[in-house]
Image: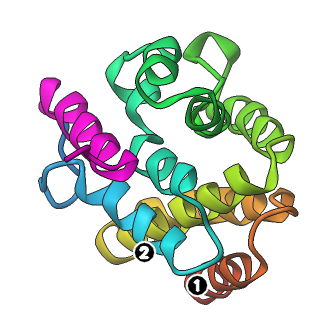
Amino acid sequence: MTESLEDRARSFATAAHESIDQRRKWTDEPYIVHPTAVAEIVRSVKHDEAMIAAALLHDVVEDTGVPIAEIEDMFGSDVAELVGWLTDVATPADGDRATRKALNRAHSAAAPARAQTIKVADVIDNSRTVAALDPEFARVYLPEKAALVEVLDKADSALTAMAKAYIGAHI
């Protein structure tokens, strides 16, 4: 029996994050709990198999050093393109936090609707975690995410409304 795209993506992402012993910052849980939560949020709205796979893989390139070419080889160009749109483009050499966030926001603003939908799901899951477990950092983080959600104008409208409502209630 052939493993589904989703199962292959989950296995690959789990192994990639485990290879660097990446854990959730505030809970110390295995990192894969975050991409899994993002995938479940995406599953709650109109989606396709590539979107679920990309949701599971969305932090692999950025966090683990796996090249985007490997994502393409393993999962195809559609998934790789989505992951590329979900990967931050700014580096520390680009300047201070505000400058880097602006560069990443512009990258996300140019993303296609499917990638923006995954990005909003990522914002929702991360915002819930930060607001609940680090209220001090949330004062910096949530306004940044509010600005990001504002430019994700092609994302699923239900998820966008959910993100805006959650962030607005916690700022």
Q: Are marks 2 and 1 in contact (CB under 8 Å)?
A: yes
User: Looking at the picture, does residue 155 appear above or below residue 132?
Assistant: above
CA distance separating discs 2 and 1: 8 Å
Residue 27: x and y, percent?
A: 16, 61
Q: Amino acid at mark 2?
A: Arg
Say which quadrant the C terminus sits in.
bottom right
Residue 14: x and y, percent?
A: 20, 41
Mark 1 lies on a secondary structure that is helix
Q: Nearer the viewer, residue 145 or 73?
A: 73
Q: Residue at x 60, y 89 (%)?
A: 169
Q: Amino acid at mark 1?
A: Tyr
Q: Is residue 21 left or right of residue 40?
A: left
Residue 79: x and y, percent?
A: 56, 37
Residue 130 visible to the viewer = no
Provide the residue span drawn in magenta.
Answer: 1-21
Q: Please name the residue that numbered disc 2 is placed on.
A: 128
User: Looking at the picture, does residue 50 appear above or below residue 171?
Assistant: above
Pointer 2 local density, CA inside 10 Å: few below 14, some 14–19, many at least 20? some
Q: Earlier in the sequence, mark 2 or mark 1?
A: 2
Q: Nearer the viewer, residue 6 or 135?
A: 6
**Of the numbered discs in the image, which one, if any, rests on residue 166?**
1
Residue 162: x and y, percent?
A: 64, 84
Q: Is residue 127 left or right of residue 93?
A: left
Mark 2 lies on a secondary structure that is helix
- Label the magenta part by its dominant secondary structure: helix
Q: Is residue 139 left or right of residue 53?
A: right
Residue 51 visible to the viewer = yes
Q: Residue at x 54, y 28 (%)?
A: 76
Q: Residue at x 67, y 56 (%)?
A: 144
Q: Residue at x 74, y 63 (%)?
A: 149
Magenta-colored stretch includes residue 123? no
